[in-house]
Image (spheres, helix red, strand yellow):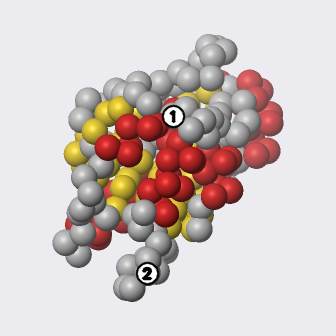
Amino acid sequence: MFLEPGFGNQRSGWIEVICGSMFSGKTEELIRRLKRARIANQKVEVFKPSKDVRYDDKKVVSHDENAMLSRPIVLSKEIMSIHEETQVIGIDEAQFFDSDLPKFCVALAEQGKRVIIAGLDMDFRGEPFGPMPNLLAVAEYITKVHAICSHCGNLATHSYRLSEEKQTIVLGEKDKYEPRCRTCFSMGTILDFRHK
Ligand code: ZN
């Protein structure tokens, strides 16, 4: 489990990335860290991309409905509009943001902020997703969480798309995706009973 390095007398902040496939518990882990910061009376602000409106316009909502209020934004530069006294910034579904997100996260860390980012590391093709690879490169701390493969029970790293849609961003839940390990992911539609 990730344990915070402590704010202490540190003059600069840092960047944490929580990544993994769908159903791996990324958002739950983000919420856990943000809640701990709040309990410690640290000022927290949370952002999510406005295109992710699967559950609620204003909340970071994980699959277990363990919700936390967030601000939907369109452009990554809007995270620079935080209140000066904010110490911890949470960003959910970071894969949907533009390629400038790493630059702004670095700027906030240099201002002494703790930036915690959650996002899908790979898209449905198994390719690195949006700004995630660059965020992983600039982060001090990286946590890769895993789901359980729907077919074999091994650790799942991939988000397999059950529908035939081809565009990179298709919002959906268990109706459209399932977690798979590398082997079951590469077997593709052979395992795809639901669409036969
Ligand atoms: Zn598997």
Could you tell me which residue is drawn at 44 percent across and 56 percent down?
108
Q: Nearer the viewer, residue 4 or 157?
A: 4
Element assignment for label 2: loop
Q: Nearer the viewer, residue 135 or 81?
A: 81
Q: Which mark is residue 58?
A: none
- Residue reaching furthest to the bottom: 9
- Indicate left or right for 84 with 6 as reference: left
The residue beneath circle 2 is 10
Element assignment for label 1: loop
- Indicate left or right for 113 with 180 as reference: left
| Residue type, mark 1 in image | Phe
| Residue type, mark 2 in image | Gln
The residue beneath circle 1 is 97
Q: From the top left corner, tell me how far across and down residue 116 is, in percent.
A: 44, 58
The image quarter in which residue 35 lies: bottom left
Disc tally is: 2
Asked if residue 105 can be seen in this view, the reply is yes
